Image (tube, rainbow, N blue to C red):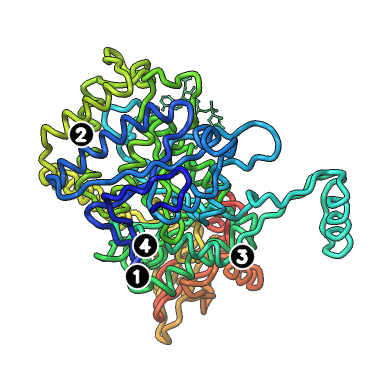
Amino acid sequence: MSAYRHIRIPTTGEKISIKNGQLHVPDQPIVGYVEGDGIGPDITKACLRIWDAAVEKAYGGKRKIHWCETYLGEKAAGLYDGNYCPDETIKALADLVVSIKGPLTTPVGGGFRSLNVALRQDLDLYACVRPVRHYAGVPSPLKRPDKVDVVIFRENTEDVYTGIEYKAGSPENEKLTKFLREEMKAKFFDGAGLGVKPISAFGTKRLVRKAIQYAIDNGRESVTLVHKGNIMKFTEGAFRNWGYEVAREEFGNVTITEEQLYAEYKGKQPEGKIVIKDRIADIMFQMMLLRPEEFDVIATMNLNGDYLSDAIAAEVGGVGIAPGANIGDHVAVFEATHGTAPKYANLNKVNPGSLLFSGVMMLEYMGWKEAADLITLVYPEVVSDGIVTYDFARQIDGAKEVGTSQFADALIERIQGGVDLEAKRKAQQAQLAKERKQREIRRLLQPMEEMVETGRVPHTVADLMTRALITVTDSETVETAMHVMTDNDISSVVVEADGKGEWGILTRRDIVSKIVHAGKNPATTRVKDICTRPVVSVPAEMSIREAAATLSRSNFSRVTVEQGGKIIGIVTETDIFNAVDKFAWALE
Ligand code: NAP
């Protein structure tokens, strides 16, 4: 007997469970669903048919989902005396572990928590996961939308979304203002509204852990931590640091940092290792337009993630078909990311894509990849044939507009017709391997340019230095050294080690003071007579700020960079100037 008032748990299937910390999915699982409001019923009906057809085809009837309807939103209000978010639904979603929902109306007016917020909080669904990729045929503003294929892990429970806010003029605000000004010596304008931005090691690490685990499970190349740590050091900067920490401490054998990728592996990603990198949030927005193929799994905080998910979704055909999920330690609720579009309710008109692909994510989460792949592979075929709902039809010349259920019919027909999954997968893998190789070659050939073009912020002197050292020897004339400087358009040359193994440097300033001012002839003076020795060298892993301190202290305008007892490069004031100019205060 079901302990529920309205929810009927199917007696034919078996519940998904957690065994030894792992999701256990039986062949006949019970999966929860919420139809949703507005266009929800139209898209849900269509999608249930498509998912069932894909599962049936992929497993020849051996596997089948037993759907369990649960209620939220208007349908819940009708059944549960005006309650939009009944406790028993929350209980059922936790009990069933995996479920999927259509869009919901949040009633306007006081006293209602947004249903989506309620779900996240009550089920502790701390990761909002949004995969964004392009499907052939889908209209996009990018020239090469096919290069976008990322999965965004957005932290769902912290950041400025926790609602710790104090209205300007309120007694609470005045109390906090007084504390901040008098005790913390903080400075800000009068009458400011105040908000608090909590970012914790706990919240960060569980999110980043999930993102890295996803990258491992799905054979992804990298995880990028997106933050504004250059400005908000103790919140967003801490997120970055804790993110690297969790990678190092818990996934040390399967991850390397981007720094290691360049410094130790010369840009060639070792087999079986995931690269952990970080990007400043604003640079990330540029990069997702200019070099989207550099990014794979993204882990970020609530606010950055909110903006970034929609911006990236828009690159590949709009939020209308972007799928999503809110996931906790095990419980997962997959969802359409658009709203209820009430004007289209019950018109059999809208695009089921967002809910459909949320279901694809769900099948992947359940480990039913074959069924998921069937849908992903037939979808572009149908869209490329011009069979689309109204929203795409208005953007594609000559398209054949169909209703929601007819679009589902077309997909199901393709699914049932059969797809050579193996051949398609092989072609896809070959393409990915080729692109990966191309990226490796670029990193190998032009590491510096790659670093800048892919939005990486330099951290150490090794990231900035000129690696192609131009040198002269002691015995050459100053005149020859001057020609070397002119020909290479540089303001100094490194002088190779003398008998005692000491390296030197000869600069344009030396020419001014020790040749012209001193009245010497450059054609007859030897380099060794006027160069500076020993040079000031810094280790390759020194931070840029420390290197700047060394430059200021020594009064030199350049230092050489040393690694393993050898001079491997040179860093000048100009290099540091250019980096600050480009990356502002991002430099640590
Ligand atoms: P919306 O429902 O997402 O609709 C905005 C517009 O987006 C629609 O008018 C339509 O554009 C397009 N659109 C949305 N879904 C589509 C689909 N499946 N196929 C094709 N086009 C689609 O946003 P809204 O009007 O701001 O919000 C309406 C209600 O939804 C509100 O009550 C809001 O609270 C709720 N909402 C719920 C969720 C959720 O449950 N996850 C999320 C957001 C909003 P055109 O008019 O150009 O055709």
The residue where tag 2 is placed is 378
Sequence-wise, the earlier of marks 4 and 3 is 4
One can see residue 144 in this view: yes
**Residue 150 vs residue 560: left or right?**
left
Tag 1: residue type?
A: Glu
- Horizontally, is 300 left or right of 441 in the view? right
Specify few, some or many for label 3: CA neighbours under 10 Å numbering under 14, 14-19, or 20 or more.
few
Q: Position of residue 436 (x, y in %)?
A: 26, 52
Read off the residue under disc 1: 264
Outermost residue to the bottom: 500
CA–CA distance in space, label 1 to label 2 = 42 Å
Image position, residue 362 (x, y; %): 33, 47
Q: Foreground: 396 or 7?
A: 7
Q: Secondary structure at mark 4?
A: helix
The Cα–Cα distance between marks 3 and 2, rounded to whole angstroms, is 74 Å
Q: Nearer the viewer, mark 1 or mark 3?
A: 1
Give whichever of discs 1 and 2 has the lower sequence position.
1
Q: Please name which of the two marks, 1 or 2, marks the residue nearer to the observer.
A: 2
Extreme residue toward the top, this view? 398
The residue where tag 4 is placed is 213
Q: Quadrant of the C terminus?
A: bottom right
Task: Mark 1: give few (<14), some (14-19) or many (20+) Cα within 10 Å.
Answer: few
